[in-house]
Image (tube, grey):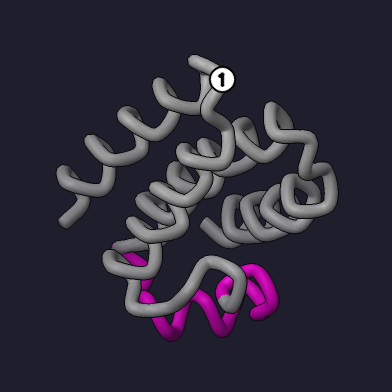
């Protein structure tokens, strides 16, 4: 699962960096939903503790990497609010490790 997620994120970043921001964002959103069983929009609204309990501590690093890519793509797409929400969760998840 982690390998597939990493490959999808790399592909999504390439797509977003080529100017297809929305396509890259959608690819990451779909990969997160598939890999973690929850939509990204829902994960962003949860506390870090809840995220950890839902996905398991061992999967937190994979989610953090997915969110870092999502942050970059959100900024490229001009979605500042989404980037900030993702950054808050990444920072909180990183603190807890």
Majority SS type along the magenta span:
helix
- From the viewer's perspective, tell me whether residue 77 is left or right of residue 14: right
Compared to 9, does 47 lie above or below? below
- From the viewer's perspective, tell me whether residue 19 is left or right of residue 59: right
- Give the number of callouts: 1
Q: Nearer the viewer, residue 92 or 68?
A: 68
- From the viewer's perspective, tell me whether residue 97 is left or right of residue 3: right
Based on the displayed image, in which of its 4 quarters is residue 37 positioned?
Answer: bottom left
Going 47% across and 51% down the picture, which residue do you hit? 26
Region of the chain picked out in magenta, as a range = 43-58
- Quadrant in the picture for the N terminus: bottom left
Q: Position of residue 89 (x, y in %)?
A: 67, 59
Looking at this rendering, what residue extends furthest in the right direction? 81
The residue identified by callout 1 is 19
Looking at this rendering, what residue extends furthest in the top direction? 18
Q: Position of residue 23 (x, y in %)?
A: 47, 40
Q: Position of residue 5 (x, y in %)?
A: 26, 48
Compared to 58, does 78 lie above or below? above
Residue 73 counted in the magenta span: no
């Amino acid at each position: 699962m982690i390998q597939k997620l990493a490959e999808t994120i790399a592909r999504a970043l390439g797509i977003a960096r080529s100017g297809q921001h929305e396509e890259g964002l959608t690819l990451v959103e779909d990969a997160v939903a598939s890999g973690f069983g929850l939509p990204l929009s829902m994960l962003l609204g949860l506390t870090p503790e809840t995220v950890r309990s839902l996905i398991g501590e061992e999967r937190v690093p994979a989610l953090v990497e997915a969110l870092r890519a999502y942050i970059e793509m959100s900024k490229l797409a001009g979605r500042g609010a989404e980037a900030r929400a993702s950054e808050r969760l990444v920072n909180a998840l990183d603190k807890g490790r």
